[in-house]
Amino acid sequence: MNGADAMVKCLVNEGVSAIFGYPGVAICPFFNSILDTDIESILVRTEQNAAHAANGLARVTGEVGVCVVTSGPGATNLITGIATAFADSIPMICISGQVESNLLGSDVFQEADITGAVESFVKFSYLIKKVEDIPRVFKEAFYIANSGRKGPVLIDVPVDIQRATLKNYVYPEEVSLRTYKPTVNGHAVQIKNVLKELEKAKRPIMCVGGGVFLSDAVEEFRAVVTKYKIPVVSTLMGIGALPTEHPLYYGMVGNNGKAYANRAMNESDLIIMVGARVADRAVSQPDLIMEKKVMVHIDVDPAEIGKNVGPTIPLVGDAKHIFGDFMKQECNCEHEDWIATLNSYKETMIFPRNPNPEYVDPAEFIRILSNKMKHDAIYVADVGQNQMWSCGYHIVRDGRFLTSGGMGTMGYAIPAAMGAKKGDMSKQVVAVCGDGSFQMSMMEFATIRQAKIPVKVIVFANNYLGLVREYQYNAYDAHYSVVDLTGNPNLEKFAEAYEMPFVRIYNMDHIEEKIEAFLKDDTTALMECMIDPMDTVK
Amino acid sequence: MQKKVFQLLVDNTSGVLSRISGLFSRRGYNIESITAGVTADPRFTRITIVASGDNDILDQIEKQVGKLVDVRDIRELKPAESVYRELCLIKVEASAEQRPAIVAVTDIFRATIVDVAPDSLIIELIGNQSKIDAFIGLLEGHKILELARTGIAGLSRGKENVIWIDE
């Protein structure tokens, strides 16, 4: 057995069924060994998308996504994908080949100091220097990636280590990391204190973030919300934790959120933040919003608590455990008046759009699309106006809403949708992109075709980088600079090139039938919706 | 702006120091000094960091550093409960006439002259930061040619806060 065999065996031991990657000389021993296993290697068309695909797979399965690339440019191309996963705390293992260990640091062909380059957006990284370390490093890496506050871990393996003989392969049963012990259980006294505050509160609100998905706590979260009748708002990453049409759900907060969601936060007297960072786009003025309020902040990462706002009650722990503990408590809390007030806001604080009838209205289109999608479908939004419309109008029932939140990485949707579908082939997966973000990963239709991963892709085409154009309209007096996308490919011909069905939609006529026909069958298809170039998200 | 002295116990892995200093630079934390050296147990390195910032920042420093996978422990070394020491080497221009005055100050501070050249001296001084600052202040009027300070190393007093790792 050599190092590469050991690496592959570690993946088998971790239960990995598919990896996304791109070979090169420095990782060839690994790709040679993986042929002897049942692990499916999916060849992406650029490395960044291997990371996004692993990201999508991880988010749907709760497992650790794996991507594998070669040294130098292969590794550096992965960086945006790693940063994207780090910003959203997605568990991922990134394996990179490296030049021979005795040549490290001498600037040989395709050498890049990747552990140094990704330092600020990996949870941890390893440069393996001894073949004997492989089993331990892989065991630790998977554990670190998928525990505590999850995130990407990079393992850089010089090619000579992959070729070196390993006499004795034993995959450790347990990790022994002296220095890494994330807090899982919430402090019992603090939990009681939260319940006391909830009993006292007249206007409580729970703001839920992506952490609830990461800790697999959706069920427990819903049980707590139902038991204590707590109204809920969400961050971008928390969309879908509660079904959109749940009577206690009051929309997404923040710059691009619902007015009634922000009002609910502002007028509340108790905010319970769960698995959310109090990030700048969700709460733009944290000090202001926290005036005269009790703030409970529940997060597995103690460093997030108090980073942007000092909470009254900090509660460090895993959301799944903490919600489980909440369920064991009793609390006499009735907030009917407050809920009635919030309902009236929800009904009245709606600002009607004035869609141009000559084009597709993205808001109404997304609403209809959601209703035509399967109840447990996965909706992947890209980044830009399409994302903001998706947040605002997509209706999540039992499915998932995926998007690049913290990093806002354009081009995320297609590879992430591909990874999500690979993670659960039984699910319907729909990606929604803009014509800008689409072109950042449209090469992946080759992967989708080759690996037989059917996804539905919808492009909102307005011939602009719409969100930037909208910003330039507001902030630079409509002085548009470098946002015109003239030169875009003809998507009908593009679809023909990849031999997939295509439909272009110009307006809302017969929209329901068109969406139904598009969604029919579990096959890859491309839809282009013509959007008014001047349409806005606000 | 406040100053705090943090004591860290970290795994003696390659790259640990760059991980810690990288964290300070990318998050914009101020580092006044950093010293590192292996402990009695060669698996660990002890690092003493003097950082400055407002209370929120100092609190974040403690949490963000504590979060690093190879950091075993971080805690504040409070002045009243700790001992800090710094080593300072000062090369001073000293002609035969100037020498007695410098030697006098050196004696008062229990510093040591460790090198003598025809027109210069190197003085070694160990102490806490304020002692060293005071000494440098007293050398005013003499030309300091070169100065090297190690930054402080610190330990807490007594046995209570000692971390034993047996595994």
Image (tube, rainbow, N blue to C red):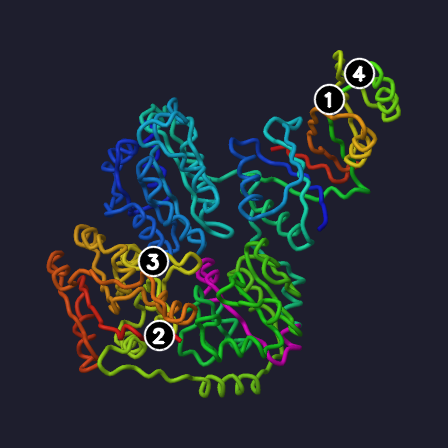
Residue that badge 2 annotates: A536
Distance CA(mark 1)–CA(mark 4)? 13 Å
Question: Compared with residue B144, is residue A38 higher up or lower down, i.e. above or below?
Answer: below
Residue that badge 1 annotates: B91
Distance CA(mark 2)–CA(mark 1)? 67 Å
What is the span of residues highlighted in magenta in the rendered image? Answer: A197-220
Secondary structure category for the residue under label 2? loop
Distance CA(mark 2)–CA(mark 4)? 78 Å
Query: Residue A410 got which mark?
Result: 3
Circle nearer the viewer, 1 or 4: 4
Tell if the residue under mark 3 belongs to the same chain as the one under mark 4: no
Distance CA(mark 3)–CA(mark 1)? 57 Å
Magenta stretch containing residue B157, yes or no? no
Q: Quadrant of residue A326?
A: bottom right
Comes first in the chain, label 2 or label 3? 3
Residue B67 horizontal/vertical position (percent)? 57, 47
Confirm whether residue A431 shows in the render.
Answer: no
Residue B59 horizontal/vertical position (percent)? 66, 52
Secondary structure category for the residue under label 4? loop
Q: Which chain carries label 3?
A: A
Check disc 2 and give the amino acid type.
Thr
Q: Quadrant of residue A453?
A: bottom left
Task: Kindly identify the residue that appears in the image at 78 percent across and 18 percent down.
Answer: B94
Circle nearer the viewer, 2 or 1: 1
Circle nearer the viewer, 2 or 4: 4
